[in-house]
Image (tube, rainbow, N blue to C red):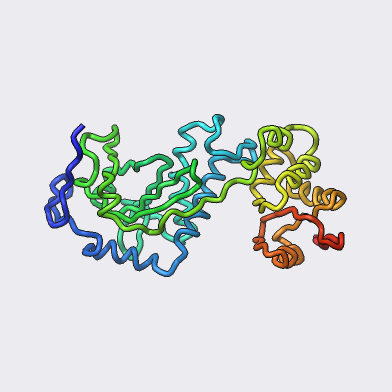
């Protein structure tokens, strides 16, 4: 197959339905630079990490399904693909951006479309062609993500009719040379349940014994790892009040020499900080009792 040769900045984009216009380098595109300035000074990679994790948790719906791995065979490919659709709304919420038409939002008065893929390319819809797009790539197997800001000129998209909706993929050369990174590769937190062996996971997620005993097993197996609230909901999927059961498991853990800390409690946050651990609200961690054998008072 012949290599796709793109039109270059300074030439006229002739592939658009909206009239011919000049192809600009990113540094010469005033709207693109305005969007970049809007993001300047914000921890964009960190905020996108939160948005992506929320989108993945939403799709997995662990509190109802007990699922915790988006790459698992029990997750339909269509569900994985839907992470991008959910991510759009998470990005709008986290960055406090409006939902607008004809694209997804306005940033610095410029229309912007928000796209994401768990594959290697994006499906740019007709209304977003020749418009500004934030394109996020999520590599699930490598637990990382990155995003670019690009003017998705139709001249810089793959040729052909695209899919039945007229969507087309962004040419690799355009991504690598005619876009601007919003942030570089950033680690995506791994659901702690993925660190369990197959046998351990089977025990923790079984229907029996009850939640308290299974949560105690989880704390024991995942000693020293931060456990988000969503993980506890996943272990207690389909049962009543998993968070209450986690508090009960904390007391049982103390009998086994484990101190279970929860970021919802000031005493726990202070105890975690004393061990060099940053514990946020909703996060749990099981650690060994201190050398003198004393636990930490984490009463409600």
Q: Nearer the viewer, residue 107 or 135?
A: 135
Rendered residue at 26%/35% (across/down): 162
Which of the 4 image quarters holds residue 217?
top right
Which of the 4 image quarters holds residue 2?
top left
Q: Quadrant of the N terminus?
A: top left
67 lies above or below 225: above
Q: Residue 30: horizontal and vertical position, in percent?
A: 24, 65
Q: Is residue 101 visible?
A: no
Q: Nearer the viewer, residue 91 or 147?
A: 147
Q: Is residue 137 visible?
A: yes
Q: Residue 194: horizontal and vertical position, in percent?
A: 62, 41
Image label count: 0
Which of the 4 image quarters holds residue 35?
bottom left
Q: Residue 107: horizontal and vertical position, in percent?
A: 35, 62
Query: Viewed as shown, does residue 106 lie left or right of 243?
Result: left
Q: Residue 53: horizontal and vertical position, in percent?
A: 53, 49
Rendered residue at 87%/50% (across/down): 255
Rendered residue at 56%/45% (across/down): 57
Query: Viewed as shown, does residue 128 lie left or right of 87?
Result: left
Query: Viewed as shown, does residue 173 lie left or right of 204?
Result: left
Residue situated furthest front in the rendering: 291
208 lies above or below 44: above
Q: Quadrant of the C terminus?
A: bottom right
């Amino acid at each position: 197959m012949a290599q796709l040769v793109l039109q270059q900045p300074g030439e006229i984009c002739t592939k658009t339905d909206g009239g011919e216009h000049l192809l600009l380098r990113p540094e010469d595109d005033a709207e693109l630079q305005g969007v970049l300035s809007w993001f300047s000074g914000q921890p964009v990679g960190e905020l996108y990490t939160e948005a992506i994790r929320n989108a993945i948790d939403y799709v997995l719906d662990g509190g109802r399904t007990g699922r915790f791995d988006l790459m698992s065979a029990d997750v339909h490919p269509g569900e994985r693909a839907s992470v991008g659709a959910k991510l759009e709304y998470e990005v709008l919420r986290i960055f406090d951006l409006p939902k607008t038409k004809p694209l997804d939002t306005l940033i610095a008065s410029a229309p912007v479309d928000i796209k994401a893929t768990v594959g290697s390319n994006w499906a740019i819809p007709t209304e977003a062609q020749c418009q500004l797009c934030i394109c996020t790539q999520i590599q699930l197997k490598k637990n990382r993500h990155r995003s670019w800001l690009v003017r998705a000129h139709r001249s810089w998209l793959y040729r052909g009719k695209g899919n039945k909706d007229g969507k087309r993929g962004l040419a690799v050369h355009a991504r690598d040379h005619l876009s601007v990174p919003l942030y570089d590769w950033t680690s995506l937190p791994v659901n702690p349940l993925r660190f369990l062996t197959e046998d351990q996971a089977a025990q923790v997620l079984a229907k029996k014994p009850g939640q308290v005993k299974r949560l105690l097993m989880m704390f024991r197996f995942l000693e020293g790892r931060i456990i988000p609230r969503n993980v506890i909901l996943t272990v207690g999927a389909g049962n009543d009040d998993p968070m209450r059961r986690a508090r009960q498991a904390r007391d049982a853990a103390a009998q086994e020499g484990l101190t279970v800390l929860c970021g919802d409690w000031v005493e726990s946050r202070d105890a975690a900080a004393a061990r060099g651990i940053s514990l946020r609200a909703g996060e749990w961690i099981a650690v060994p009792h201190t050398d003198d054998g004393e636990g930490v008072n984490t009463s409600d």
